[in-house]
Amino acid sequence: MGKRVVIENWMSLRGATGWTGVMQEVEDWVDTSDYNSAVVRIEVSSIAGCTLYLEGCDQSGGSFVTHKAIDAATSDGATVVTLLRQVPFGAAERLNTLMRWRVTGPGSPNAWSANFRITGVFK
């Protein structure tokens, strides 16, 4: 079995003005350095006018790669992402040292909202 981690418990975000995005707090990013694989479940109960990203990076301050992007057109309720440490650097399937979520929108004055939860099993 693996270690079960709640990366983000149910989170509801919404707004009605132009914005650039919301990111998980740095102290809540998941350090995966002790693990070789992860199965991450992204549950989305609603999303509109924005995109939810699961991202990874190998060092604080480094460039993040997108593991998965979910918006209203691609949301099907629950998405599973499998990540492995031993794949090429920069590959979307690579388990990076740090993991976080981020929500971005078009920056327009349109209303936006996202309600989601992210959990994982790390081995």
Image (tube, rainbow, N blue to C red):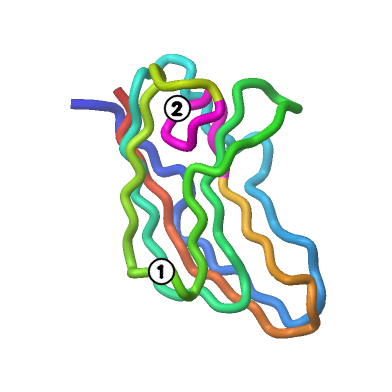
According to the picture, the residue beneath numbered tag 1 turns out to be 75
Quadrant holding the N terminus: top left
The spot of residue 16 in percent (x, y) is 74, 82
Which residue occupies 46% across, 74% down? 73
* Amino acid on which the number 1 mark rests in the picture: Ser
Residue span colored magenta: 90-100
**Residue 59 vertical placement versus 119 (above, below):** above
Asked if residue 102 is among those painted magenta in the image, a careful observer would answer: no
**Residue 107 lies in what quarter of the image?**
bottom right
* Amino acid on which the number 2 mark rests in the picture: Leu
Q: Nearer the viewer, residue 91 or 38?
A: 91
Disc 1, SS: loop
**Residue 12 lies in what quarter of the image?**
bottom right
The spot of residue 114 in percent (x, y) is 54, 70
95 left or right of 99 in image: left
Residue 95 shows which numbered tag?
Answer: 2
Which residue occupies 81% across, 75% down? 18
Which residue occupies 70% across, 32% down? 63
44 left or right of 111 in image: left
**Residue 66 vertical placement versus 95 (above, below):** below
